[in-house]
Each structure stands twice: as C-alpha cells, then as structure tokens.
C-alpha cells in the first residue's frame, strides 16, 4: 500500500521539523540571553571596570523573554502551516501560497533583536569613559 502524494507529505514533514529546530534554537538562545546577565554581572566589572546599569539588566531579561516568546510563536506557526499544507496536498484544488509577509516580519524582528543584543553587549564590555 502506498501513500498518496508521499513525496509532498514527506517534504512537508521535513519543513515542519526544520521550523521546529529553528524554534527550539531561538528559545534556547532566549534562555541564554536572559541568563547571560548573571555572567555579565560577575565578569563585566572586572573586564571594563564598571558595573552594569539596571537598564542593561532589564534589557537582557526582556530580550531573552521576547526570544522565548518568538520561539513559542514559531512552534504554533509551524503547526498551523504543517496542517494547512497537508490539507492542500491532499486537496484536488490549487492552493494559493501564503505566509511570506509573516516570514519577513519574523526575520525583521530577529534582526532587530540581534542588533539590539550586539549594541547591549558591546556597551557592556567597553571601558567606562
């Protein structure tokens, strides 16, 4: 017995698993960022001769939590897309391709968070003037 449209379903499942790996990586990075302030509080004063500001500590916590939330949202998005694509594969009708705007918005958010974290960490390790 063969599964109808097996190649398409297998490709859909591989894509789903890739989205899941990305989501887990983003959540793990968010956890690391959120907890990285403990490392900075210990090491940064000895490296740069100054103490981190309370704003910097809160920024790290917020950025980490945002990354964890983005990763969780990505899991939900991957689930919805997997189910929608599985139904479209089995359907006899032609389906319209959707979701590229959401993908671009997610990528933009991650770029913004990456740049923000770079600026935050570069300030933490720069010597006080």
Image (cartoon, grey):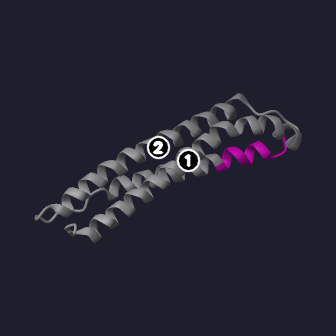
The residue that mark 2 highlights is: 70
Front-most of residues 14 and 65: 14
Residues drawn in magenta: 118-129
- In the rendered image, residue 83, in percent from the top left (x then y), is placed at 26, 52
Of badges 1 and 2, nearer the viewer stands: 2
Horizontal relation, residue 99 to residue 123: left or right: left
Q: Residue at x 58, y 45 (%)?
A: 28
Q: Tell me the chief SS of the magenta region.
A: helix
Front-most of residues 18 and 59: 18
- In the rendered image, residue 45, in percent from the top left (x then y), is placed at 85, 37
Q: Residue at x 68, y 32 (%)?
A: 57
Q: Residue furthest top?
A: 54
Q: Residue at x 30, y 48 (%)?
A: 80
Q: Is residue 52 above or below residue 109?
A: above
Q: Is residue 46 above or below residue 10?
A: above
Horizontal relation, residue 61 to residue 8: left or right: right
The part of the image, by quadrant, that contains residue 88 is: bottom left
Front-most of residues 3 and 59: 3
Q: Residue at x 59, y 47 (%)?
A: 29
The residue that mark 1 highlights is: 113
């Amino acid at each position: 017995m063969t599964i109808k449209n097996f190649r398409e379903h297998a490709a859909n499942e591989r894509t789903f698993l890739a989205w899941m790996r990305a989501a887990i990586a983003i959540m793990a990075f968010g956890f690391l960022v959120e907890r990285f302030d403990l490392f900075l509080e210990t090491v940064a004063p000895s490296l740069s001769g100054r103490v981190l500001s309370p704003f910097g500590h809160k920024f790290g916590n917020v950025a980490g939590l945002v990354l964890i939330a983005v990763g969780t949202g990505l899991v939900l998005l991957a689930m919805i897309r997997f189910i929608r694509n599985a139904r479209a594969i089995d359907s006899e009708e032609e389906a319209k391709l959707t979701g590229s705007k959401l993908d671009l918005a997610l990528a933009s958010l991650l770029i913004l968070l990456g740049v923000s974290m770079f600026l935050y960490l570069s300030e933490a390790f720069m010597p006080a003037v």
